[in-house]
Amino acid sequence: MINFFRKIRQNLLSEGKTGKYLKYAIGEIVLVVIGILIALQINNWNQQRILEKQSQQVLLNLREEIKENKTELESAIEFLKQRVDRRIEYLNSSDQNISDSEKIKKISTMVFFYLERIELPIIENELGPNKKIFQWSELTKSMQNLSESIGYYNKGIEYLENDVHSNILPYLVDQGVMTDIMVSNGILNSKDYLNVDVYNSENFRNVIASSTVMTSALLEGANKVIKNYNELLLIINQRIE
């Protein structure tokens, strides 16, 4: 093709048709520019397809991760609800007719807990500025809301852990209840329970009441995360569909 155009150009020059040659040369330049623009457009289209495919895969991965995290958090919410219900039941009760071993077991189930912290789903480099997914303002805002609610929830776990280690456990140790708790859980050999009066003491009620307030706040934070999970899943499903 190049040889074909070269022969036409040489023939025009040899025949002295300069004006026609200039028109031809301009036309050739225009064709070359058009060809370059078409090639660039095709390249941009291919890059766009690649980015779109990557974005779709990121969204699919994000959706699956959120679903898994949501299921785990729902289990944690059930645990927190049970913990709050047990404590409120204890605070409202004045029942003195339960056995000493049952009192110690109730103390044990009210004060000890373990919860996993939540990690923000998807890693940052999958949402970086070189990805089209990062430019979706609705998704970015939803991710920001989720990040804030997860931070609040994790901070609530930290507060509860500090309360257990700084207030509840030192109080139980000071009252001599820890060995009773270990006996009730089968860790130590059986013995008479010597410190069951703690169960109905006003000080212990205040300790449990304070911790219940923080646990209720953590439960509220967990429900907020669930709400943000659902909002983000809705946005993702709309983008995928």
Image (spheres, rainbow, N blue to C red):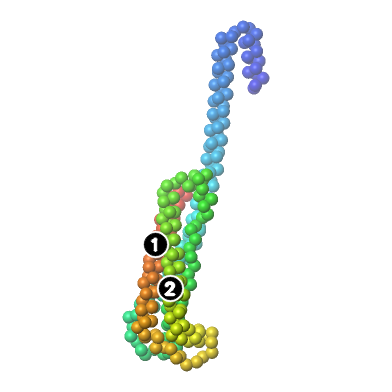
State yes or no: discs 2 and 1 in contact (Cβ < 8 Å). no
Residue 218 can be seen, yes or no: yes
Residue 184 can be seen, yes or no: no
Task: Name the side, left or right, on which 100 lies relative to 1.
Answer: left
Q: What is the x, y in percent for residue 104? A: 44, 85
- Determine which of the numbered discs, if any, sits on residue 31 in the image: none
Indicate the secondary structure of the residue bearing disc 2.
Answer: helix
Kindly identify the amino acid type of the residue bearing the numbered disc 1.
Lys
Query: Residue 29's quadrant in the figure?
Result: top right
Q: Which residue is drawn at the image coordinates 43% and 89% (left, top)?
A: 195
Task: Name the side, left or right, on which 64 lies relative to 205.
Answer: right
Q: What is the x, y in percent for residue 64? A: 50, 57
Task: Name the side, left or right, on which 226 lies relative to 1.
Answer: left
Q: Which residue is drawn at the image coordinates 55% and 18% (left, top)?
A: 27
User: Compared to 202, does 118 lie above or below?
Assistant: above
Query: Residue 90's quadrant in the figure?
Result: bottom left
Q: Earlier in the sequence, mark 2 or mark 1?
A: 2
Q: Counting other residues with Cα less than 10 Å from the Cα at mark 1, is it few (<14), some (14-19), or many (20 or more)?
A: some
Relative to the observer, which residue lies in front, 42 or 216? 216
Query: Residue 73's quadrant in the figure?
Result: bottom left
Q: Which residue is drawn at the image coordinates 36% and 72% (left, top)?
A: 213
Q: Label 2: which residue?
A: 163
State which quarter of the image contains the N terminus: top right
Indicate the secondary structure of the residue bearing disc 1.
Answer: helix
User: Compared to 22, does 45 lie above or below?
Assistant: below
Q: What is the x, y in percent for residue 69? A: 48, 62
Q: Counting other residues with Cα less than 10 Å from the Cα at mark 2, is it few (<14), some (14-19), or many (20 or more)?
A: some
Relative to the observer, which residue lies in front, 47 or 100? 100
- Determine which of the numbered discs, if any, sits on residue 224 in the image: 1
Q: CA distance from mark 2 to mark 1?
A: 22 Å
Task: Name the side, left or right, on which 22 lies relative to 10.
Answer: left
